[in-house]
Image (cartoon, helix red, strand yellow):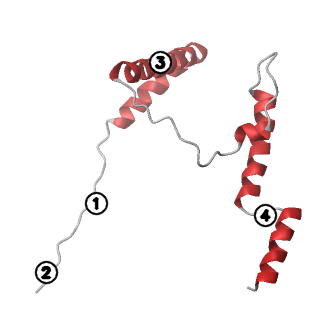
Amino acid sequence: MSSWEFTQWLQYNKLEPFGDERADYRSAIIACTLANIHGRKKGQKPFKPADFMPKFGEVADDRRQDAKEIEATLRGYAIAHNRARKNRAKRLGPLAKEAVARRSSARNVPKRGLKIKEVDSG
């Protein structure tokens, strides 16, 4: 590719961007639209596509969590999971108990392993 052709491609890219950056921007527009429709609270400013663009080259927070922070995070996940299960069981009633019983009995079935036949190499 000559320098003239390369310059022409650069000019074209300024007019009609293409490549990964453009694809990231399209994805950011979709994420922004969905967040504004479903995830915005009353009084909160609308999201912008720039809020969803990947930020390359920025230094991430490399601080390590200590054991208490990890435990608090996992405890929060467990509480949310148990609350969701309890609410689901209330909604389904007796059907939920039957489904849980079927699921747990299916887990106790031993898995079949692959049987490998030995081949004589002689």
Q: Quadrant of the N terminus?
A: bottom right
Helix, strand or loop for disc 1:
loop
Mark sitting earlier along the chain (2/3): 3
Q: Report the residue marked by disc 4.
A: 18
Q: Quadrant of residue 119?
A: bottom left
Q: Nearer the viewer, residue 89 or 106?
A: 89
- Give the residue drawn at x 43%, y 31%: 63
At which x and y percent is residue 99? 49, 26
At which x and y percent is residue 43? 82, 16
Mark sitting earlier along the chain (4/3): 4
Left or right of 5 in this view: 57: left
Measured Cα–Cα span from mark 4 to mark 3? 43 Å
Q: Quadrant of the C terminus?
A: bottom left
Crowdedness near tag 1: few (<14), some (14–19) or many (≥20) residues, C-alpha within 10 Å: few
Q: Nearer the viewer, mark 2 or mark 3?
A: 3
Measured Cα–Cα span from mark 4 to mark 2? 59 Å
Q: Report the residue marked by disc 2.
A: 120
Q: Report the residue marked by disc 1.
A: 114
Q: Report the residue marked by disc 3.
A: 76
